Image (cartoon, rainbow, N blue to C red):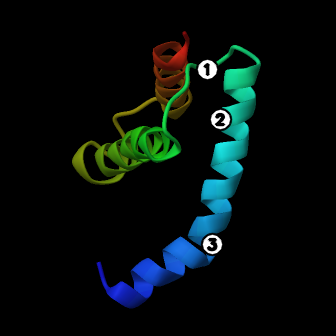
């Protein structure tokens, strides 16, 4: 990645996203809804699901998808995989 873009993501909007994600995950762990997981790993899992869905939906199989059902399935899979 370009060092300028990388710096912007680490110290600009990316830093805000990380701080928010850390707070949300910490609260979920405290409430017993999530197992402890590193924030960067959580974001990679989430990004992989979203980007994979987008690539499949827009490039590989456009028009052959029930968006609501797919999004629901992704959310359930992610949530169930993070439960203690």
The mark nearer the N terminus, 2 or 3, is 3
Contact (CB < 8 A) between labels 2 and 1? Answer: yes
Tell me the residue at 48%/20% (across/down): 73
Tell me the residue at 58%/77% (across/down): 11
Q: Secondary structure at mark 2?
A: helix
Residue linked to disc 1: 34
Marks 2 and 1 sit apart, C-alpha to C-alpha, by: 7 Å
Within 10 angstroms of label 3, few (less than 14), some, or many (20 or more) residues?
Answer: few
Residue 41: where, in percent of width, then height?
Answer: 42, 41
The mark nearer the N terminus, 2 or 1, is 2
Tell me the residue at 23%/47% (across/down): 60
Marks 1 and 3 sit apart, C-alpha to C-alpha, by: 25 Å
The mark nearer the N terminus, 1 or 3, is 3
Return the residue found at the far top: 84
Q: Which mark identifies residue 13? A: 3
Residue linked to disc 2: 25
């Amino acid at each position: 990645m370009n060092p300028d873009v990388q710096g912007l993501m680490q110290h600009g909007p990316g830093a805000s996203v990380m701080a928010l994600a850390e707070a949300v995950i910490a609260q979920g762990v405290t409430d017993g809804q999530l197992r402890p997981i590193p924030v960067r790993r959580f974001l990679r899992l989430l990004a992989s699901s979203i980007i994979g869905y987008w690539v499949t939906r827009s490039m590989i199989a456009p028009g052959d998808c029930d968006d609501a059902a797919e999004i629901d399935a992704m959310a359930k899979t992610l949530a169930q995989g993070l439960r203690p």
